[in-house]
Image (cartoon, rainbow, N blue to C red):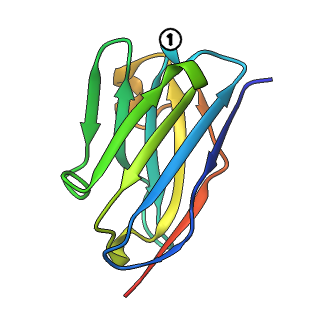
């Protein structure tokens, strides 16, 4: 069975840090681009970061550039999202997603999605 499972979401004060993880089972990250998306209540889903370890590609949305870092541990089939200098506007449910095609992932089309993890940043 193919699964993506996010973890690491929590309640944190503004300026704090969190590290999200996305663990995959049933397929190898080597062949897929992995993206992090978030959705806040009443807002559209936003793509915030993607990584393709096989191509050496990364992407960051302007809203998180310089504060968030995505990394891939292919040996553990896990992708991490290190989030620093968190702001209240980062509050959202964070999802990871996998796509065989980088271009499709960049437009929000994924083959697999995780169930999400809640990040809440208090002011």
Q: Nearer the viewer, residue 13 or 3?
A: 13
- Side (left or right) of 19 relative to 15: right
Q: Name the residue under label 1.
A: 31
Residue 40 percent across, percent down from the top left: 47, 68
Give the quadrant of the C terminus: bottom left
Q: Which residue is drawn at 49% across and 34% down?
A: 79
* Direction bottom: furthest residue: 123
**Eyeballing the image, is 113 above or below 55?**
below
Q: Is residue 48 above or below residue 24?
A: below
Picture coordinates of residue 87, whole percent (x, y): 32, 74
Label 1 secondary element: helix
Query: Which one is nearer the viewer's eye here, 115 or 41?
Result: 115
Residue at horizontal 36 percent and vertical 40 percent from the top: 70
Q: Judge left or right: residue 56 versus residue 19.
A: left
Tell me if 63 is positioned left or right of 53 in this view: left
Identified at 36% across, 78% down, the residue is 88
Q: Quadrant of the N terminus?
A: top right
Q: In which quarter of the image is residue 33?
A: top left
Q: Tell me the crowding category of disc 1: few under 14, some 14 to 19, or many 20 or more residues within 10 angstroms, Cα based.
A: some
Q: Where is residue 116 in the image (x, y as percent from the top left)?
A: 61, 53
Q: How many marks?
A: 1
Extreme residue in the right direction: 1
Instruction: Kindly indicate the quadrant of the structure image that contains residue 108.
Output: top left
Image coordinates for residue 119, horizontal then vertical, percent: 51, 67
Residue 56 as seen in the image, left or right of residue 123: left
């Amino acid at each position: 069975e193919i699964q993506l499972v996010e973890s690491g979401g929590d309640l944190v004060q503004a300026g704090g840090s969190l590290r999200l993880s996305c663990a995959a089972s049933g397929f190898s990250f080597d062949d897929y681009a992995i993206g992090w998306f978030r959705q806040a209540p009443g807002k559209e889903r936003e793509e915030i970061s993607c990584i393709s370890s096989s191509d050496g590609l990364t992407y960051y949305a302007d809203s998180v550039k310089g504060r968030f870092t995505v990394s891939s541990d292919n040996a553990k089939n896990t992708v991490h999202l290190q989030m620093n200098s968190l702001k209240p506007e980062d509050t959202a449910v964070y999802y990871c997603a996998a796509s065989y095609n980088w271009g499709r992932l960049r437009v929000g089309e994924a083959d697999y999605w995780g169930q999400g993890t809640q990040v809440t940043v208090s002011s």
